[in-house]
Amino acid sequence: MLHFLQTLDRRWIFLLMALAVLIPLLVEVRFPEIPTAIVRDAFDEIEKLPRGSTVLMAFDFDPGSEGELQPMANALTRHVAEKELVAIYLTTWETGLRSPQKAVELLRQEYPHLQYGKDYVNLGFRAGRDTLIKLMKENLRQAYDKDVNGTPLDDMPATRPVKSAKNVDLIVCIGAGTPGAKEWVQYVATPLNKPLVVGTTGVQTPMFYPYVPRPMRGMLGAIKGASEYEELLNTAYPKVAERPSAHDGRKRMAPQMFAHLLMVLLIVLGNVITWISRKAPAA
């Protein structure tokens, strides 16, 4: 048995990992979510905004991080739409163009009564990275003078009164790196004392805890944070819960858990095999 485990073809391990991910997805295994305080604070920050408030939505991530961050971006987009807030989407990443566009497509499909240019706008991408964020603190027109369709900001009701980040009621940043949440904290939220809600990848989450509760009012950490936010949103708005796509975060929790359990089991098994082999008498 020991020899069999020591010489086991690694392709069997790959197969086990594939099954650990696929089976929970196919049978739609779901576990109950108990939202943490930091996610509930993020939810409450949007929930308390009055109708017509303006939210700046910075989706600073690329397709490589979509699996972790897109579910939370979708949940936040739905929440803003349910509250009938004005959403201004943008990205400071040259590889992040499709994230704001996905938000616009979601709004067109699920909230057809909302009007582009009045209820939401996609500013797309502009070069500048950190400098772009600094510009938006003082003058939005120096960073973005038109939307992705070439329409001047002064020609759209959603952006006409927004001269800078000072004129928005809340900033939301879903970020996977630099520039991202840290830059919004340093260059905009802190100097303007502007409330900020952040969504981050799992590896980034620990570094942002010191920024809570000021200036960051709440945070969604990785797919777990997205799942918790979905639970809050779907409970508060039952019509949202009826949409299959409104459960993307929760759907991904079970495969992640089973994959992690398998990894831990394999690590323990590998150490046990090594310990036994060292104790076994030499042939």
Image (cartoon, rainbow, N blue to C red):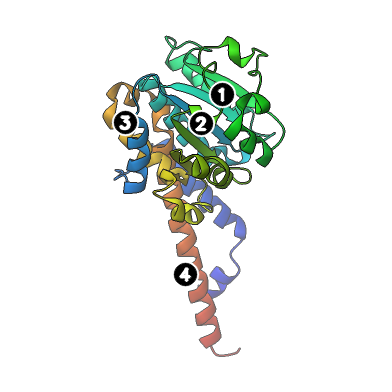
Residue picked out by circle 1:
163
Estimate the spatial distance between the alpha carbons at disc 2 and disc 1, rounded to whole Å.
8 Å
> Please, what is the three-letter code of the amino acid marked with disc 1?
Lys
**Discs 2/3, front:** 2
Estimate the spatial distance between the alpha carbons at disc 2 and disc 3, rounded to whole Å.
19 Å
* Quarter placement of the C terminus: bottom right
Estimate the spatial distance between the alpha carbons at disc 4 and disc 3, rounded to whole Å.
47 Å
> Please, what is the three-letter code of the amino acid marked with disc 2?
Lys
**Discs 2/4, front:** 2
Is residue 272 visible from the viewing direction of this image? yes
Estimate the spatial distance between the alpha carbons at disc 3 and disc 1, rounded to whole Å.
24 Å
Residue picked out by circle 3:
48
Q: Are marks 2 and 3 in contact (CB under 8 Å)?
A: no
Q: Are marks 2 and 1 in contact (CB under 8 Å)?
A: yes
Estimate the spatial distance between the alpha carbons at disc 2 and disc 4, rounded to whole Å.
53 Å
Instruction: Name the spot of residue 18 as percent of width and height, x first.
Output: 53, 47
